Image: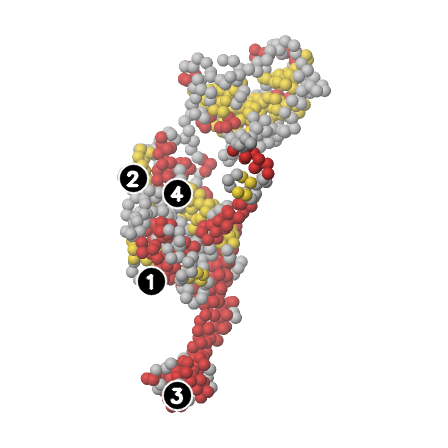
Amino acid sequence: MPRKSKKDTEKSVKKNVPDAYIAGSGIVAEEHITDTLEKNYMPYAMSVIVSRALPEIDGFKPSHRKLLYTMYKMGLLTGAKTKSANIVGQTMKLNPHGDAAIYETMVRLARGNEALLHPYIDSKGNFGKAYSRDMAYAASRYTEAKLNPICAELFRDIDKDTVDFVPNYDNETTEPTLLPATFPSVLVNSNVGIAVSMASSVCSFNLAEICDTTIALIRSPEHNILSTLKGPDFSGGGFMLYDEDELEKVYRTGRGSVKVRSRYQFDKESNCIEIVQIPPTTTVEAIMDKIVELIKGGKIREISYIRDETDINGLKLAIDIKRGVDPDKLMKKLFRMTPLQDNYSCNFNILIGGTPRVMGVYEILDEWIAFRRECIKRRTYFELNKKKERLHLLLGLQKILLDIDKAVRIVRETEEESEVVPNLMIGFGIDETQAEYVAEIKLRHLNKEYILKRTADIEGLKKDIAEMEEILGSDKKIKNIIVSELKEVKDKYSQPRKTMFYYGGDEDENEEEDDVPDYSVNLFLTRDGYFKKITSQSLRMANEQKLKDGDVITMFTEATNKTELLFFTDKCQVYKTRADAFKDAKASELGDFIPVKLGFDEYENLLSMIATTDYSGYLVMIFDNGKAAKVPLSAYETKTNRKKLANAYTSKARLIKMFLVTENTDILVRSTNGRAIVFNTGMILPKSARDTIGVQVMTLKAKAEVDNAYIVTNDMAENVQKYVIKNVPAAGNLAKDLEDPDQLKL
């Protein structure tokens, strides 16, 4: 019998096994990709959201909290500084993510880095700078640190059951789930984090203003925060645009943005602008790179030299300017064109009870007040139980005072040690706890003086217990405690505001200088959508225009580099730009492909281009149904820098041609049934709406439509005289001998 080949064997096996079987790999279970993602990716995503990237109501991410708590347990709140490497090593008992990640967290919290308005760590050594991309921090073995005094407010009463503790990752110790901060630290220092599918960006506010605002909200929930919380206060200072509407939006919704610009001073002697404070969203290097790029591109010509003079005294970016240059005008230009002015985007996404919530300042402070109220209740309850236990023991000791000799006799006459406590309980009518306390008193303390001193605390304890029970039953008293603690924090740790304000009237947004060079250019547009901007000198040197195979030039105009260009598409949209947005090309190049250059929508095609410098004149549009619309070109002018306008013309008919006319002009219109008319644009009244359907100018027979139109030139005027009409609409005359001047030939 012939032996089967390996190929035949595999074929026979495949016939007799299910589809889920793959040779050499066993049974493969089928599973939808969505199920796999849900099982494998969702737990990771939730871990990042809940346990890593987002801050909680105490103002800290888990990595921050683990580091600060470790330093607190090391005695670094009151003790001397220790090496950062030592702190990092100890923190690894709580944070398993590695020493590099822990040290980076520590750097940002340190005073030397200048990232926080109120740093939590007092540092010694090089911790880098938040405003510098290239100024790296030293290794942990070279730097030292301890906790700043303000951290005492983070850990106050943490040992009095104010917050929950959970086991660490290896169950060898415990760590707090939150820190019982006595002030709203969540809003006092900035915090930025990127999770999975969500992010958080909380800006910092002045400590004194936050304390005053919180106190005012406790006393009156209807308090207007804008009256006490003027706006964010950044560690790097700068000037913030005071916009009440935007601030109110941030305070109510937790989303919005604030505009921050750099602080500068001008040194007349050296003719130099010195930047001393920058927005928190940028770095010195990013600013320098952008300014150098603008200088190389010829957009800024007033600067002769730029250098970074940052030293031990702080940030300084020096800009040498040319003679005769107005420094204030130059700075206005730099604010517009560089990160010297930038927006800080607010996204107050905070974990509340393990759930991420985007909240405004009002809601955040309400949540913090509720959190702090619970901390005070737990602390009071803890102290109440301790005092009750102490009172209970002293009441037992008081009974011993009645007959000390009897107590001594009971102890002396008891034969077994285990019977001492029961005999004391019987002899004085006290419980086991009290009897244990009495039995443990040293012999030297069994005197009347000692017992009287101890029992003298009974009345004080009873008074304290009554007050604590009153606090637990009164929300008003708890609020008063929160208020007193906030006042104490404000008096101890508040500092003057670093970020000042400027107002809308201080900036001339509508009078921006246009620094784009202006010169004569020639604009070419082809049927397939290729655009070229060629200077007159370059055009004179060219023999012929390079075009794509089968393409032809459909438009040519002389213009300037500042000419506004409007590109109309078959989706009733217009894309706006300027000639200076295109590089100077040569005739030997294909040019820019407009749909790609301007980012057309999918399947969107270019129809026509209009060039203007002042948006004067009218746009005349001819449609396939014989109608024509006349719209002022100013209808396409916008005050804002919008790049795309929808409803550029009506969608109820197909656009055949459009013309820009500055005065009444004759236009020849031809139809598919061989007829033509010549009408004057003065016969049509202009409409202000861009998508007007227009008026009927040519009467069409069934199945006929307009297929072309063009402006009547002086050379054409005599030949088309018989097609001129006096009223619209008109059917027109048969046109047999008319030439089509639609294509431009060079």
Element type at marker 1? loop
User: For the residue marked with disc 4, what is the amino acid?
Assistant: Thr
Q: Nearer the viewer, residue 83 or 271?
A: 83
Q: Position of residue 207 (x, y in %)?
A: 41, 56
Measure the C-alpha gap from mark 4 to mark 3: 82 Å
Disc 1 target residue: 75
- The numbered mark at residue 639 is none
Q: Nearer the viewer, residue 418 or 409?
A: 418
Observer-side mark, 3 or 2, equals 3
Disc 2 target residue: 268
Disc 4 target residue: 282
Vertical comparison of 365 with 430: above or below: above
Q: Position of residue 123 (x, y in %)?
A: 31, 54
Between discs 1 and 4, the one toward the N terminus: 1
Q: Position of residue 127 (x, y in %)?
A: 32, 49
* Mark 4 Cα shell of 10 Å, populated few (<14), some (14-19), many (≥20): some
